């Protein structure tokens, strides 16, 4: 039993000052209230052979209790939280029912056995143990015949170390200091006589961690630099020297420490100690330094990265004794102090005060995701690593022509979901291996479009993603875990299901409700639109399914246009070129079934192009790619120019001189066919126009905000007709 906790009753007073807003009367918090938990009661019997028993109920989340005494008394008595009830019993054994009632009216109950006897307690058995997981905590259990309760005097102080428990329960106490203490147990029943037990007990402190620090989250290799950890999903240099001798003196002691084969660094008698890296680390592109530290001491150590060129700067580690403390230190803390992060050669730990012990794990630099590679994906364009999709009571076509191409989804093909009244209709697949949802690998995302014209019935518009264990065959649903999200009709939208951070629902019939992140048996994904156990119709289109870590959020500027009237590009402009952004697609085919496109009409302009400007400026580190579709009919071309298309980035603030510092990528094109062209300013070859002798890499620039698209080059007077569609700026 836990030490009795008294929770004081709260009287709620509502002050009506003027008119109340809707928010002021919002009682939606009641929806999140759950039934009381940890329901119990302490019995205390007077030692005068009268049979008078005081019952003090307790629970987490209870406001009051209904106590049924278990004898001939038929009606329950109500007790407010923090108060007690007393009742006189004859000698005998009784089943006392404690029903806890929460603020919302939800109830929980337990039944406790009460033995009332006027004999002195006999056959006393006492167990006193150091808690295996909590430092300096002692647990005491007492059993005896003819006993109701027991008192434990733990011997550390005179007034504050008395704990009361029911006979057979376990009570605990945490000491300030380890050492030897006299523990006295007094066992009581209904008789005047009591039975006592006394023991000299050695209280011990736990001086090392019993469990590893939390495993680092999954990260892309480009977003992390490892220094030390057995739990990284990326490598670190094994030749780093984690215990160099820096003339610390004779008392220093170091070594590796293992917890279930997880290697941890231990620094004992810490004055100062450190890590000598095998090679300097350039962490200038990272954002944080992570480290986990455990100590049993009153120790707030210091951590100093040491730069080969600028020396060292210390960070004070505010440690909590007897638990892992995790730090993600912004590198700006060090750089603001003048420390270079481009040549980190060492790390140093200082004891504060000196002489204590720290355990160190999971040292690495990291940054927010700069790129995203899902672990499992399908774009329904023939790319992906999902082996087989199946429809269960639902029609399914995973190469269906996208009927709603627009700026929110330029894909040519999608998955069609066709529920024609199946009671449990869904689409699903089984992964090649079981999911490991730990370390941030808990996120599933997809695009979905549900046309209102394809729905019958009155079901709530929603989509659910369920994870199941395929090994259970027809019973896969019985232990599934599920996340349900609302959807909007008649639009493409991205839905994310995060089994670490979203609300999930388990179906489990063995009384266990495991957290999905802790499970290793899940390998089947089931997607269901507008719920189950109904016979309504639903048509839906699904695209760009991904599983892995949280994708980086899209950041401005946004530049998408499908020329269907819903793009993010405010104004297109034709420079010596005719322009029509709502031109009927003259070449509708399987490669582009869009109804409208941009018509580009170069009738001999020397520098003809089409262009637009965005705000804010482009950040090519965050997003470096520009993609579009283009169709150039051979019948619209004059002259002998090379068939090509270029995309140029310029600084609009230069006015008529914008071209002077532009950066450009040129790609070849085919005539008489729709094709998709991508311009990547990180990986493609680019050409700069720059007249001040500097040739900067485009990703290092922050002044670019204008896009110029040009077909078949410039400085000529030839004619070109082209059609452009599905422009997108992305990562």
Image (spheres, helix red, strand yellow):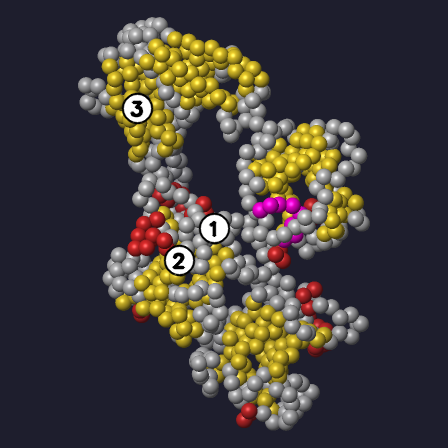
Where residue 441 appears, as percent x and y from the top left, is 50, 53
Q: Residues within 10 Å of mark 1 (few under 14, many from 20)?
A: many
First in sequence: mark 2 or mark 3? 3
What secondary structure is the stretch in magenta mostly built from?
Answer: strand
Numbered badge on residue 112: 3
Q: Is residue 449 above or below residue 525?
A: below
Name the image quarter holding residue 535.
Answer: bottom left
Chain part drawn in magenta: 224-231
Give the residue drawn at x 57%, y 41%. Answer: 261
> Which quadrant holds residue 729?
bottom right
Residue 77 x %, y %: 26, 23
Q: Is residue 663 above or below residue 219?
A: below
The reply to whether dot 1 and dot 2 touch (C-beta < 8 Å) is no
Residue drawn where x is 57% and y is 65% of the image? 731
Label placed on residue 437:
1
| Residue 607 quadrant | bottom right
* Quadrant (top left/top right/bottom left/bottom right) for the N terminus: top left
């Amino acid at each position: 039993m836990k030490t009795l906790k008294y929770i004081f009753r709260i009287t709620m007073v509502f002050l009506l000052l003027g008119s109340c807003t809707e928010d002021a009367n919002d009682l939606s918090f009641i929806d999140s209230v759950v039934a009381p938990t940890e329901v119990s009661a302490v019995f205390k019997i007077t030692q005068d052979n009268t049979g008078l028993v005081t019952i003090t109920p307790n629970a987490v989340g209870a406001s009051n209790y209904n106590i049924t005494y278990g004898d001939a008394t038929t009606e329950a008595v109500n007790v407010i939280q923090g108060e007690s009830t007393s009742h006189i019993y004859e000698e005998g054994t009784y089943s006392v029912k404690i029903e806890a009632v929460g603020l919302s009216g939800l109830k929980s109950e337990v039944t406790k056995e009460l033995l009332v006897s006027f004999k002195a307690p006999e056959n006393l058995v006492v167990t006193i143990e150091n808690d295996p997981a909590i430092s300096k905590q002692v647990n005491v259990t007492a059993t005896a015949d003819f006993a109701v309760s027991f008192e434990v005097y733990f011997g550390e102080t005179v007034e504050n170390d008395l704990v009361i428990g029911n006979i057979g329960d376990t009570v605990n106490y945490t000491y300030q200091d380890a050492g030897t203490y006299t523990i006295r147990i007094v066992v009581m029943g209904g008789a005047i006589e009591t039975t006592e037990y006394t023991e000299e007990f050695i209280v011990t402190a736990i001086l090392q961690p019993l469990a590893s620090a939390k495993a680092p989250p999954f990260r892309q290799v480009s977003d992390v630099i490892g220094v030390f950890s057995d739990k990284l999903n990326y490598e670190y240099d094994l030749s780093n020297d984690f215990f160099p001798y820096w003339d610390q003196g004779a008392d220093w002691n170091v070594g590796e420490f293992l917890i279930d084969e997880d290697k941890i660094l231990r620094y004992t008698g810490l004055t100062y100690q450190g890590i000598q890296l095998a090679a300097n680390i350039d962490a200038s592109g990272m954002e944080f330094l992570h480290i986990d530290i455990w100590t049993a001491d009153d120790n707030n150590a210091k951590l100093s990265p040491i730069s080969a060129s600028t020396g060292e700067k210390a960070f004070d580690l505010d440690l909590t004794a007897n638990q892992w403390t995790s730090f993600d230190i912004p590198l700006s803390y060090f750089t603001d102090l003048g420390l270079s992060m481009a040549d980190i050669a060492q790390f140093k730990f200082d004891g504060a005060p000196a002489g204590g012990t720290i355990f160190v794990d999971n040292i690495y630099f990291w940054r927010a995701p700069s790129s995203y590679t899902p672990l499992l994906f399908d774009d329904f364009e023939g790319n992906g690593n999902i082996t087989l999709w199946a429809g269960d009571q639902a029609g399914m076509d995973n190469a269906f022509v996208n009927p709603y191409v627009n700026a929110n989804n330029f894909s040519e093909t999608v998955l069609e979901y066709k529920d024609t009244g199946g009671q449990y209709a869904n689409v699903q697949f089984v992964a090649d291996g079981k999911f490991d949802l730990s370390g941030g690998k808990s996120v599933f995302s997809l695009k979905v479009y549900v046309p209102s014209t394809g729905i019958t019935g009155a079901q709530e518009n929603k989509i659910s993603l369920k994870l199941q264990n395929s090994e259970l065959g027809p019973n896969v649903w019985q232990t599934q875990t599920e996340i349900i999200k609302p959807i909007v009709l008649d639009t493409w939208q991205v839905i994310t299901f995060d089994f670490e951070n979203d609300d999930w629902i388990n179906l489990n019939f063995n009384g266990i409700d495991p957290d999905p992140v802790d499970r290793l048996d899940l390998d089947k994904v089931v997607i269901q639109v507008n719920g189950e156990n109904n016979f309504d119709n639903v048509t839906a289109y699904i695209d760009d399914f991904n599983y892995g870590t949280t994708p980086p959020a899209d950041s401005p500027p946004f530049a998408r246009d499908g020329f269907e009237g819903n793009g993010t590009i405010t104004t297109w402009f034709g420079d010596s070129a005719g322009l029509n952004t709502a031109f009927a697609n003259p070449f509708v085919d399987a490669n582009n079934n869009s109804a409208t496109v941009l018509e580009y009409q170069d009738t001999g302009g020397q520098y003809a192009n089409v262009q637009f400007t965005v705000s804010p400026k482009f950040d090519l580190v965050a997003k470096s790619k520009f993609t579009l579709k283009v169709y150039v009919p051979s019948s619209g071309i004059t002259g002998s120019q090379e068939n090509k298309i270029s995309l140029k980035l310029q600084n609009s603030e230069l006015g008529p001189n914008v071209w002077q510092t532009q950066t450009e990528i040129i790609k070849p094109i085919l005539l008489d066919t729709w094709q998709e062209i991508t311009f990547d300013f990180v990986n493609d070859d680019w050409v700069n126009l720059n007249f001040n002798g500097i040739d900067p890499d485009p990703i290092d620039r922050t002044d670019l905000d204008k896009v110029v698209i040009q077909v078949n080059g410039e400085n000529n007077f030839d004619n070109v007709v082209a059609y452009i569609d599905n422009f997108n700026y992305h990562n």
